[in-house]
Amino acid sequence: MSRRTKVAVIGSGNIGTDLMIKVLRHSDTLDMAAMVGIDPASDGLARADRMGVPTTAKGVEGLIAMPHFDEIEIVFDATSAGAHRANAAALEPYGKRLIDLTPAAIGPFVVPAVNIDQHLDAPNVNMVTCGGQATIPIVAAIARVAAVPYAEIVASIASKSAGPGTRANIDEFTETTSHAIEAVGGATSGRAIIILNPAEPPLIMRDTVLALIGDPDPVTHAAVRDSIEAMIAEVAAYVPGYRLKQAVQIAPIDPESVRTLAGGAVVTHQVSVFLEVEGAAHYLPAYAGNLDIMTSAAVRVAERMAATTSESVR
């Protein structure tokens, strides 16, 4: 049996707990070595105790003080943007690999279906945001066929799936996602919007991607549709609940009406893609697809890091 890579999770809230359960129940290459929180009464720490995972309620300093800390190679941070900056600084001297699930964006953005192999050597990688993980693959799928002067995404999530960390980081969410639409998705200019939907019963995550292109050729449009469908399958390989809500729409548009958005580029059509993300319900309800896509993507990256490290050792 091959050696498993030991990992720790900082943040015993919903995202951290779902990460832990994914590692424990579904990963063949990762070994859950520590769950770290700051609230001794949190459900995540209690659940970790019941599942035999070593815990500490003393935050990152408690993690560093754990007797098996030296054996841990990868640390997931599921706290908040501000907390991650402090955690990263505390862990930097110890050479751990960090996978950041907050919008802090200290390290390079990673969206597994788009650029998983580009930053495997980085000491700290950022998983963008839930909206980014859901929509940036679509922007990238369009951009690999036709230039995208402008792309806009709208992520609608159930209010009940937005915990205090998400609510405290709304500004960072929009800024980080907008930047990643450009840096990873390949759009010249990007914009992100998040909507917390209070509907009862809670609705699953819905995402809309609107992209402007400047190619009127029907052959190009067919290639865009094919590229998007291939990308949907790529993401669904690690997020089974990721799917198109309806057929991709490519409609003509008046270039003058969007000239400002397009930065002066000549555009002819708008590509509209409507997605939904249903969670796997490993720990959280199925409507919390926004959290599931983040944890699924993070585990995917950690497993690829672990595999790359094992290959280099051999």
Image (cartoon, rainbow, N blue to C red):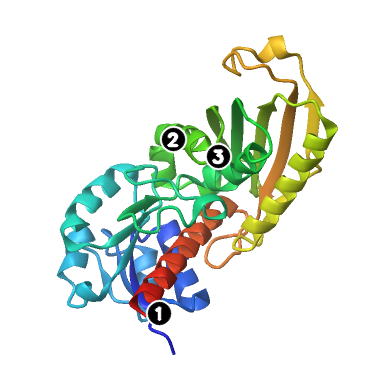
Q: Which mark is residue 185?
A: 3
Residue 262 coordinates in the image, percent (x, y):
61, 19
Q: Earlier in the sequence, mark 2 or mark 3?
A: 2
Circle 3 — which element? loop
Circle 1 — which element? loop
Dot 2 amino acid type? Ile
Q: Earlier in the sequence, mark 2 or mark 1?
A: 1
Residue 134 coordinates in the image, percent (x, y):
59, 47
Relative to 125, does residue 34 appear above or below in the rendering? below
Dot 1 amino acid type? Met
Residue 191 coordinates in the image, percent (x, y):
54, 28
Q: Residue at x 62, y 54 (%)?
A: 287
Comparing marks 3 and 1, which lies closer to the viewer? 3
- Classify 10 Å Cα crowding around label 3: few (below 14), some (14-19), many (20 and above): many
Q: Residue at x 62, y 59 (%)?
A: 286
Q: Which residue is mark 2?
A: 170
Q: Is residue 277 visible?
A: yes
Q: Residue at x 20, y 73 (%)?
A: 70
Question: Which image quadrant for residue 214?
Answer: top right
Q: Which residue is mark 1?
A: 51
Indicate left or right for 113 with 129 as reference.
right
